[in-house]
């Protein structure tokens, strides 16, 4: 019987998941389909009951449902509970279990670039959903400390207070007045705001705020935004000769981890990357010095 998978979002038409998963399913010759489901917020409960009732094997969850789905699930994994968001739901014989593959997906995309996160001092810019996943991912991967800097220092503080009891490394929170001091002790900078999305003057203004010269020579810079692939922040990091990692790797790896949970096999990463439009001459997620 054909395995049915999909993604719940509202709107959902922008989601790249159907293309990415569909290409992997086709490449492996599996009897499965992956559909976009436009689920209005008020219909979320009904839609999730439908997953069980119709025998849908699993769904990914995107905006605005990542937090709201939790109350309808039979269980969630530790990362999803700590982050407070689920992006993958698996239907196990009628019981729905939620996972967060964003955090491990980010870790894989960074480690694939040749960096080991263990022992690194990290700085995360932003205090939204992507920042939450990044902080938990970095902590689980053994970062020695994580500084969270947001334009609203209060938002960074609230996030750190909430997450600190659940992760091992020390977390610090600050506003942008601490950018210079923080960058000076950063091995790994994670841009997790939406400021660089779609480029333009806001993205340029944001990048010019950042004291890239204060970063150590061996520092690496990651931008979670993947539209554009070379964001204003990555362009400035490259100009300084720093190692950079774009956001497409995280998107691919969170999808690959979900695919494995749904279907029990690893998808071909290069096929997924191609379906997302990564140029064939680019490595999967990293541009490093001299690469
Ligand atoms: P949220 O809306 O939850 O958070 C956005 C954050 O960005 C907030 O902290 C916000 O601050 C901050 N921000 C927005 N504009 C600016 C600005 N001009 N200067 C400084 N800070 C700013 O979004 P998410 O956290 O869910 O997503 C952030 C980005 O990460 C998205 O654009 C998305 O493209 C990317 N992402 C990538 C993924 C991947 O797989 N690669 C996965 C998930 C997200 P404030 O609260 O003050 O407005």
Image (cartoon, grey):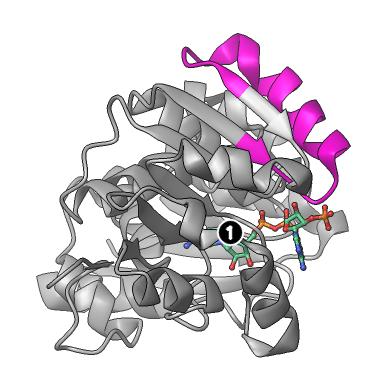
Which x, y percent locates residue 175? 78, 42
- Foreground residue among 208 and 11: 208
What residue is drawn where x is 62% and y is 85%? 199
Q: Quadrant of the N terminus?
A: bottom left
Q: Is residue 55 visible?
A: no
Q: Is residue 101 above or below residue 248?
A: above
In the image, the segment drawn in magenta is 148-171
Disc 1 residue crowd, few under 14, some 14–19, many 20+, Cα 10 Å: some
Q: Secondary structure at mark 1?
A: loop
Residue 27 vs 55, above or below: the answer is below
| Residue 258 pos. (x, y %) | 36, 50
Q: Does residue 193 show up?
A: yes
Which of 152 and 128 lies nearest the eye of the viewer? 152
Asked if the magenta segment contains residue 157, the reply would be: yes
Left or right, 98 with reference to 126: left
The quadrant of the picture occupied by the C terminus is bottom left
Q: Which residue is mark 1?
A: 211
The residue shown at (22%, 71%) is 24
Q: Position of residue 117 (x, y in %)?
A: 29, 35
Looking at the image, which is closer to me, 193 or 1?
A: 193
- Quick check: which quadrant has ligand 1? bottom right
Q: Is residue 207 magenta?
A: no
Q: Nearer the viewer, residue 211 or 143?
A: 211
Q: Picture quarter containing residue 26? A: bottom left
Tell me the quarter of the picture where residue 155 sits: top right
Q: Toward which corner of the image does residue 160 lie, by quadrant? A: top right
């Amino acid at each position: 019987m054909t395995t049915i998978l999909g993604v719940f979002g509202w709107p959902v038409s922008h989601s790249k998941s159907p293309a990415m998963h569909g290409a992997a399913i086709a490449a492996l010759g599996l009897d499965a389909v992956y559909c976009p489901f436009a689920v209005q917020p008020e219909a979320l409960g009904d839609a999730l009951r439908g997953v069980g009732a119709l025998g849908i094997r699993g769904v990914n969850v995107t905006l605005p449902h990542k937090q709201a789905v939790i109350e309808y699930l039979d269980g969630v994994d530790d990362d999803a509970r700590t982050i407070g968001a689920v992006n993958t739901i698996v239907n196990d014989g009628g019981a729905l279990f939620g996972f967060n593959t964003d955090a491990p997906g980010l870790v894989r995309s960074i480690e694939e670039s040749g960096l080991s996160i263990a022992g690194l001092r990290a700085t995360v810019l932003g205090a939204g959903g992507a920042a939450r996943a990044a902080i938990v991912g970095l902590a689980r991967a053994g970062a020695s400390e994580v500084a969270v800097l947001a334009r609203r220092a209060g938002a960074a503080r609230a996030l750190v207070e909430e997450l600190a009891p659940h992760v091992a490394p020390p977390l610090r929170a600050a506003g942008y007045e601490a950018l210079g001091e923080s960058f000076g002790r950063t091995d790994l900078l994670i841009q997790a705001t939406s400021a660089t999305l779609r480029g333009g003057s806001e993205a340029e203004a944001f990048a010019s705020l950042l004291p890239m010269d204060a970063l150590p020579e061996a520092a690496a810079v990651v931008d979670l935004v993947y539209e554009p692939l070379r964001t204003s922040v990555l362009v400035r990091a490259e100009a300084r000769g720093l190692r950079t990692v774009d956001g497409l790797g995280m998107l691919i790896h969170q999808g690959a981890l979900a695919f494995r949970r749904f279907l029990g096999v690893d998808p071909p990463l290069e096929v997924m990357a191609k379906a997302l439009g990564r140029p064939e001459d680019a490595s999967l997620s990293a541009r490093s010095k001299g690469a």
